[in-house]
C-alpha cells in the first residue's frame, strides 16, 4: 500500500545544521563545537518546554540556546550580531541529496510535507532558501500544537492535515 504522504523533519534531515558553521566561524574559534552546543541546547529547551507545558516558539528558543552557546564557548557577540546569527536558521543549506530525492518522490506521485519544530515563518524561509519549495506541498509547524516533538500532538498535525491514519504516512527524520 502506497503511503498518503511522506513527511520530513526539516532541520537536520533536509537541511544541514552543519551549514551554520560558516556563520559561526566569524565568532567562534571552534565553529563545529559551537554549533553542536547551540543545537544541543536548542533541543534541550524544546524538550523542557514540552515537559513543563510552557511552550515558547522555536525562534525564541533558538536565540536563548545561542546565548547559552556564546557563554559556554566564551564568545563575545553584540546583541545585533546575535539576532543575525540566529536568523541563519532561515538559510540553512540543504543536504546535497535533499532536492533530488524530493523531486524524485514527487515525480513518482508521492506527496511530500515538512513537520518541523521551526516556526511557520522560519520554516517557510528555510524551505524557500534551500530551493525545496517546489517539492514540499505543506509546511506543518509545532506552533499549531504548542508542543515540540516527540509529543503526540505534533504528529497528529500530519494525520489531521492529510485526514488519514498514522500508518498511512511515512515520517522521515535523521534525529533520534
Image (cartoon, grey):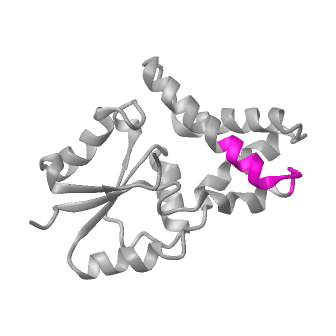
Q: Main secondary structure of the magenta part?
A: helix
- Does residue 28 appear left or right of residue 68 in this picture? right
Seen from this angle, which residue lies furthest left? 1
Q: Is 30 covered by the magenta stretch?
A: yes
Q: Position of residue 104 (x, y in %)?
A: 33, 81
User: What's drawn in magenta, residue-wise?
Assistant: 26-38
Count of residue discs: 0
- Does residue 49 appear left or right of residue 137 in this picture? right
Q: Position of residue 126 (x, y in %)?
A: 53, 60
Residue at screen point 80% across, 43% down: 80
Residue at screen point 55% across, 37% down: 43
Front position in the image: 82 or 170: 170
Front position in the image: 81 or 67: 67
Quadrant assignment, res 79? top right
Residue at screen point 60% across, 37% down: 42
Q: Is 124 covered by the magenta stretch?
A: no
Amino acid at each position: 500500500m502506497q503511503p498518503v504522504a511522506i513527511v520530513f523533519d526539516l532541520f537536520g534531515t533536509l537541511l544541514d545544521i552543519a551549514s551554520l558553521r560558516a556563520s559561526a566561524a566569524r565568532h567562534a574559534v571552534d565553529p563545529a563545537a559551537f554549533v553542536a552546543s547551540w543545537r544541543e541546547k536548542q533541543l534541550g529547551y524544546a524538550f523542557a518546554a514540552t515537559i513543563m507545558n510552557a511552550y515558547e516558539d522555536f525562534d525564541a528558543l533558538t536565540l536563548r540556546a545561542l546565548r547559552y552557546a556564546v557563554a559556554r564557548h566564551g564568545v563575545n557577540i553584540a546583541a545585533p550580531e546575535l539576532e543575525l546569527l540566529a536568523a541563519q536558521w532561515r538559510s540553512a543549506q540543504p543536504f546535497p541529496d535533499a532536492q533530488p530525492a524530493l523531486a524524485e518522490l514527487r515525480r513518482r506521485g508521492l506527496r511530500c510535507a515538512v513537520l518541523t519544530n521551526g516556526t511557520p515563518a522560519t520554516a517557510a524561509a528555510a524551505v524557500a532558501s534551500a530551493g525545496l519549495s517546489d517539492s514540499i506541498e505543506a509546511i506543518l509547524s509545532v506552533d499549531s500544537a504548542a508542543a515540540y516533538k516527540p509529543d503526540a500532538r505534533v504528529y497528529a498535525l500530519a494525520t489531521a492535515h492529510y485526514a488519514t491514519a498514522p500508518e498511512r504516512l511515512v515520517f522521515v527524520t535523521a534525529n533520534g
